[in-house]
Image (tube, rainbow, N blue to C red):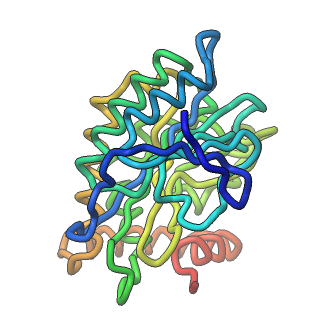
Amino acid sequence: MEYIVESDGSKRYLVTKDKELLESEEYLFGCEFEFYPNEKYNQEHFIERLCLISQSDVVVNDIFVPSFKNATNYMQLKPDISLDSNGLEISTPICSYDKLMEYIIEINSLIEQYGYTNDDTGLHIHISKAKKDGVNFDFYKFALLCNDRGLLDRWGTRNGYCINVMSVINYNTKRDSKVLKNKKGRVWNLELVSKNRVEIRTMGGVDYHLKNREILQELTEYRDIFRETLDRDTQAFRALKREHLEMVKSASDGEKIGFMKLFFRND
């Protein structure tokens, strides 16, 4: 397979297919798939399959996350620092909603053939507004709406990388401390990456790659809530917000500070 070496040492395998045009898209998407290779895994064959799936070049780095300019425009195969030493991650290029639906089905099928998923592994979805100017995404509203619709607990708490963001008020209880003991770190299952982009880490666990129906359904739900977050507040949401803020009032000062830092940060 033909490739060039980028400035950071990553190999970029050249794909001749036309790149997806995103100029008319209002929202942009991306996804990361964590997995472990199985006994059938052969990197060369795996890269060939990724090239067939991708509508862009495929970037491969065996040591670290690719960091050269515009690396996120390509499909990537790289090590995952949150997994054990042989854990891998596939990340899609920035794409449309429809293209991400295709990627999820095709890449999960690839993982089924060459790998496996367990409690440590997850699938992370990114959603952003294509135009960054003037966007100051209300992360608190997004989290409240996701929680109200039962999205944040559907896959359970798998490890220190997928704690329910709405548990920020009581994450340091004795029960939660036991759950988190000896974990690799505490990372919430939703994150505001920038003023126009969120990362969703709720999905994953044993055999998540076999659950396309659930994943695609939730992707649609998250997309719709992302849109709703950018719309004017409804009466129902204002009532939901008042109820939650009343609960926050009864929290300790330390818990209130944690809540404010998470949901009302100034970047």
Judged left or right of residue 233, residue 262 is right
In percent of the image, x 60 and y 69: which residue is there?
Answer: 251
In percent of the image, x 53 and y 18: which residue is there?
Answer: 114
Residue 210 vs residue 232, the one in the foreground? 210
Q: Quadrant of residue 182?
A: top right
Q: Quadrant of the C terminus?
A: bottom right
Farthest right residue in view: 182
Residue 150, horizontal then vertical, whole percent: 34, 46
| Residue 251 against residue 98 in the figure, above or below | below
In percent of the image, x 58 and y 40: which residue is there?
Answer: 77
In percent of the image, x 58 and y 48: which residue is there?
Answer: 12
Q: Quadrant of the N terminus?
A: top right
Judged left or right of residue 150, residue 98 is left
Residue 179, horizontal then vertical, whole percent: 69, 38
| Residue 191 against residue 229 in the figure, above or below | above
Q: How many marks?
A: 0
- Decide if residue 175 is in sight here: no
| Residue 128 against residue 153 in the figure, above or below | below
Residue 140 vs residue 246, the one in the foreground? 140
- Decide if residue 198 is in sight here: yes
Q: Quadrant of residue 43?
A: top right
Residue 83, horizontal then vertical, whole percent: 70, 36
Farthest front residue in view: 2
